[in-house]
Amino acid sequence: MVMYPGSELPALHSDGDVVIGGVFPLHYVVTEPQHSYNSKPQIASCSSFYQRAFRWMMTMVFAVEEINHNSSLLPGVKLGYHIMDCCDHIPTGLQALFSLLRHSKTVDKRKTKESSTCLYYSPVPAVIGLASSSPTRAVAHTLGPFNIPLVSYFATCTCLTDKHLYPSFLRTVPSDLFQVRGLVKLVTYFGWFWVGTIGTTDDYSLYGIQAFSNQFGRQGGCVAFHLSIPASPTMAEIQEMADKLESSTARVVVVFATEGQLLNLFLELAQRNVIGIQWIASEAWVTSSRLASPQFLHLLQGTVGFTFPGVSIPGLKEFLLNVRPSPKPGMEFFNMFWEEHFGCKLEFKNGEHAFEKPVCTGSEDLRTTDSSYSDVSQVRISYNVYKAVYAIAHALHTFWNCDSAGPSGGLCEKHSSFSNGQFLQYLNMVNFTNQFDEKVYFDSNGEPVPLYDIINWQKDSKDKIRFFKVGTYDASAPQREQLQIKKNTIVWTKGQLQVPVSQCSAPCPPGSRQATRQGEPKCCFDCLPCADGEISNQTGSTECTKCPEYFWSDKEKVKCVAGEEEFLSFYDTMGIILVALTLLGFLLTTIITIVFHSFRYTPIVKANNSEISFLLLLSLKLCFLCCLVFIGQPSWWTCRLRQAAFGISFVLCLSCLLVKTIVVLLAFRTNVPGSRGRKLFGTSQQRILIICATAPQICLCSGWVLGAPPFPFRNPNYQALTGKIVVECKEPWPPGFYLLLGYIGLLAFVCLLLAFFGRKLPDTFNEAKFISFSMLIFWAVWISFIPAYVSSPGKFSVAVEIFAILASSFGLLLCIFVPKCYIILLHPERNIKKGMTGKYPR
C-alpha cells in the first residue's frame, strides 16, 4: 500500500488490474480555510476522526482482498483500490473525487510504458461512496455526464432517485422513501399522532423530514415542532433547542441526522437530565456507538429506529484487528485511527504536540480494547460496503465474460476496454445471491430491496446500551405484512415497559367527538358530546355517526337503540283525560236520550220533532264514540275508520240541525197553521233531506278509503326533537281530509245562516237562537282547530283533533238539549202546549 506522490490529499492505495475508487467520511468536522484570492486556495482542515467510517473503509479493503483470493470470481484479475477522505463535506468530497480521477489518469500514462494491455487505458470503472446525501449529490452530479457509476453505501436521500439528474448513481442502501413510510407506520402503530421532528440543513434531513411530515399528516398525525440544527450551531442555538424540547407536550421525537450533528444537542440534554422523551431514530444514527456511550444512557435508553439488516462477515474481525500504524507513505489513515483509538501520539510524526498526549509505541493491542470498531457481530453499513464491492466485481465478471472457456483457459478476457456507459449497463444488470443468501440486484432506479431491521436501545446488566432487534420492515411485502414488531420485547424511555403517550389532547371518549381548536393543529381539540340521534362508539372519534332511521342514541351516545314509538295511548295522562271526556259526553247524551224518550209525549219533545231529535242524539253519540278510534296505536282498520267515522257522524249531526232549523223557520214563519209550507216539508221530506245532505260525505269518505286509504306510518321527522318515533296515520291523499272538513263547514255555514234568519222568532221557544249559538261555538272550535292541528307535533295533533270533536259535540249537546231538559226536569209546568205557543203566563 502506497500513497501516490504529489497527491494533495491523503489516500489509501493498492495497485491492481482494475482500481476501484472509494470515498469515506473518515473525519466529520471541517474547518473552512480563509481564502485571500491572492494565492492558491488551501485544502480544508479535517478533524474529529470517525472510527466507524474507518471500519467501513477497511471493509472495502477486506472485500477487495477476499475477491482477489477467490478463484471463481474474476479469475486472473487483480482488483486494486484508491480510497480518499471526504470529511463528510461537499467541497472536500469533490476535491477527493478530482484527486482520485487525476491519480487514475497518471497511473494510466505510467502503466502504458510497462504493458500494452488495454486495461491500463481504462478510467476508474466505479466509485464506492459516499455516506451523507449532500456530498453524494455533488459527486453523483459530477460523475453522471461521464456515466461513471457511483455506488453509495449510506446515502439514502430520496432526491438521488432522479435518474435525469443522477443517471450513474446506484446504492446498496434503500432510499429514505421506504424508511419514511416505515417510520410513519411505526409511529402510527403505537398511536403517536403528536410528535416533534429534529433535522439538519443537509439534503438527507430536509428531504427526509419533509417526506415524513407529509405522509404523517395524511395519516392524521401532527408535527408539534421542528428543530433544525445548523451546520455549526452556537451554544445559544443549542440551548434554545433544548428549551423547546423540555417545554413541548410532544414526548415522541423523530430525528433525521447523523451522530456527529446530534452530539452537541444531546450533550446539552444529558447535562440538563432531560428524560422521558421517546426518540425515534433514522438509520443514520440508530446504531451509533458514540451516542450509545454511558453518558447518554439516561437520555437515549429506549430509542427505537430503523437500520439495515446486519450480518457477521467471516474473517472481517481478524482483518480489522491486524491493523498497525506505520511511518510509510500512504499509511496516514491507519496512523490517524491508531492515535484516535488509543488516545496517544505516534513517535514518528515528528513529535508534534507529543506533550499533550502520551506517546504511542505502535505495539498496542486492539484485542484488549472493547469498541464498536472490533464489534463485527452484526455489521450493517459495513455490509452495504461489502455488497457494493461484490456488485462491482460481479459486473466486471460478466463484462469480461469470465465464465467462458476460451484460449485463456477460463480466465477473464481482459482485452475488452471500458467505454462510457458500457460498464454502467452491466452494473445495472447485476443479479446474484451472496454467501448470506441475500439476493443482490438494482431496480430501475438503482435501488436494492427495501428491507430494514427495527432496533431498540436497551440497557444490559453492565449498564451499557445494547442494540436489540425487535422487528422488521419489508417495504416489498403486502401492506398488512410490511411491519412486524415484537411489542413485548421493547423497552421504552426511562426503562418503561408500557408504551409512552404523546398527545396534545387526550382522545375523546365514546359518546363524543373531536372539535379542532381554531388556529391550532388538528391534534389539539376539545371533546364535544354527540348530538341527539348520533353516536360514537370508539375512543378518539372525529365525527359522530347518525343513527339509522327508526333508531335513536342511548343516554351515553355510544349505541343506537330502537326508537320509542309514540302515539296517543289509553294509558297516557292526556289519553285518560280525553277518554274520560268522551265517555262523559256519551253518558250525558245517553241520559238526555233517556229523558227525551221518557217524556217523548210531552209538548216540548213533540214540538221539536222527536224523530229528528233522537237521530241528532244518535249522531252526537257517534261523534263522541269516534274519538275512541283516534286513541291507541294506529292500525290498519283504525286509520281507515277514524276520519270516515268523524266526517260522517258530524255531517249526520249537522244534517239533523239543518232540518230542525228549516222546521223552526217554517213553523214560525207560516201565519196559518197547517198551511201548505209545512205540508211541503213533512216527515218524509225531512228524512230525504237528511239522506241527501249526508250522502255526499258518505261517497267522499268511501272513495277516499277505497282509493287512497290512510295507513299506519312510523314518522321519524319528530325523532330529532323528541327521540321518539311518532306512529300516525299517513294520508296519501291529503285533499281528502280537507274536502271532508270543507263539506262539514258548508253545512255548518248553511245552518248558521238559516238560524240567523230566525233570530227574531218569539222568545218563548226560539230553537233557532240555540242553533245559532251552537253553530257559533262550532265555527269557533273548528276555525281554531286548523292552525293548531297543523302546528302540533306528533300525538298532540291527534289530541287537538279529538278536543275539537269533543268541544263541538259538547257545544251542540249543551246548546240544543240542555235547555229542554231544564224545562222537562225542573219546570214541568212550562212543558205544556200553551208554554210552547207563548201563551203561558210567566
Image: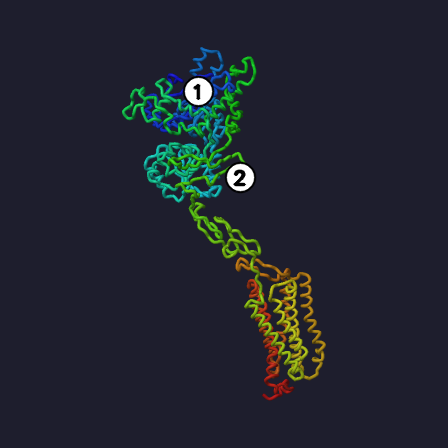
Amino acid marked by disc 2: Arg
In the image, taking residue 164 as reference, residue 755 lies left or right, namely right
Give the crowd class for mark 1: few <14, some 14-19, many >=20 residues within 10 Å: many
Q: Could you tell me if the residues under marks 2 and 1 are in contact, i.e. CB atoms within 8 Å? A: no
Residues at marks 2 and 1, CA–CA distance in whole angstroms: 44 Å
Nearest the viewer among 788 and 178 is 178
Q: Residue at x 36, y 43 (%)?
A: 247
Q: Nearer the viewer, residue 491 or 530?
A: 491
Task: Give coordinates of residue 633: x percent, y percent.
Answer: 60, 64
- Choose between 632 and 436: the one closer to the eye: 436
Which mark is drawn over residue 480? Answer: 2
Return the residue nearer the eye: 336 or 134.
Answer: 336
Type of amino acid at the residue the image marks with label 1: Tyr
- Left or right relative to 806: residue 514: left
Q: Residues within 10 Å of mark 2 (few under 14, many from 20)?
A: few
- Report the residue marked by disc 1: 81
